[in-house]
Image (tube, rainbow, N blue to C red):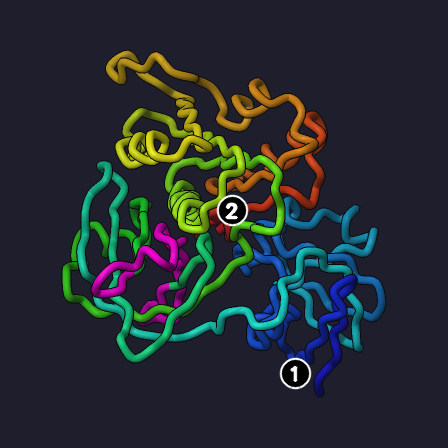
Amino acid sequence: MSFHVTLQPSGRQYNVDGDETLLTAAIREGIGLPYGCKDGACGSCKCKLIEGQVVMGEHQEKALSAAEQAAGMILTCRATPQTDVVLEARGVAAEGQFPVLKMPGRVLSLERLAEDVMRVKVQLPANQNFQFHAGQYIEFLLRDGARRAYSMANAPHKLGTPPAIELHIRHMPGGKFTDQVFSTLKEKDIVRMEGPFGSFYLREDSDKPIVLLASGTGFAPIKALIERMEAQGLSRPTVLYWGGRRKADLYLTDWLAEATARLPWLRFVPVLSDALPEDGWTGRTGFVHQAVMADLPDLSGHQVYACGAPIVIESAQRDFVAQCGLPEDEFYADSFTSEADKHPNA
């Protein structure tokens, strides 16, 4: 049994087989539905069900509230169709999105950028043409079938020789994958990957000024966006607000100093929430999204690209729209949901 899906206003159509979710089938068919965690935790794939019936699987209240569900909203990562359906899904990408590939990779290098952040470069296989948008992510396929997702921190034109993707991996003590990265993983090890995934990438058809918002290793895909903008010769006024608890959490400020010196359209505002005297910090303090609001109380003419911890993304989206006039459809985000975020009651 398969069902037919029509997306409005784009008019894109695809089929969903058997007990697939709407999102799983869309990814398989190269349909660019928006999504993030794929686990019912972040809400990035929220769409409006216009016609038809679906069964909603388990999900978190913060991703889709009961009131939203009553109003016809669904999460495509958790919705299995029971009939043909019509969805309102704005921002659906055009035909010809990059294919999702499973492939091996070879660890090229490991470099500690901070006590708990490792830069891992993974060499891509020579026999596969891996293509992606700056800002997207890949998933590591672990031996027990588990997956772990990480954003690529370099733009496609910055893969280098040999071609390799760059990842910024924060150590989560007890983490099934990150414990390996910080203890046993070594150069030349082979890893299994699948990607690209995600709808976090630069909308280049706009000329609006840009706010980039990052917390912690949410800087990784933001770095890729900056590289993409430079390569495309874009000069839209852009300001990056990067938040961390301590000074060490802002682990690539030298890279940013070079970028801002080279790119007159780029500004950088670092923000610490828990600066200590030994940090010698004289910059901005507090919550990073509130620093944006203090500097830019009117966001009605901006685009925002936000990446990092779920609480930061949720707070920014809520407050930017409600208090600063940001149009809802100009907030693009990648919420870094950990396994603990996905299963808060585990």
249 magenta-colored: no
Q: Nearer the viewer, residue 318 or 227?
A: 227
- Per the rendering, the mark at residue 59 is none
Q: Is residue 158 magenta?
A: yes
Asked if residue 74 lies left or right of residue 53, the reply is left
Q: Is residue 203 above or below residue 270?
A: below
The kind of residue on which mark 2 rests is Ser
- The image position of residue 69, as x and y in percent, is 77, 53
User: Which residue shows up at 42% across the image and 22% down it?
Assistant: 273
Residue type, label 1: Gly
Q: Position of residue 141 (x, y in %)?
A: 36, 68
Disc 1 target residue:
18
Q: Is residue 84 left or right of residue 341?
A: right
Using the image, determine if residue 96 lies above or below residue 134: below
222 sits to left or right of 174: right
Rendered-image quadrant of the N terminus: bottom right
Q: CA distance from mark 2 to mark 1?
A: 29 Å
| Label 2 CA crowd tier, 10 Å (few <14, some 14–19, many 20+) | many
Mark count: 2
Q: Which residues are magenta?
A: 140-164
Q: Nearer the viewer, residue 106 or 178?
A: 106
- In the image, farthest residue toward the front: 233
What residue would you read off at disc 2? 335
The reply to whether the C-beta atoms of the residues labelled 2 and 1 are less than 8 Å apart is no
Image-quadrant location for residue 90: bottom right
Q: Secondary structure at mark 2?
A: strand
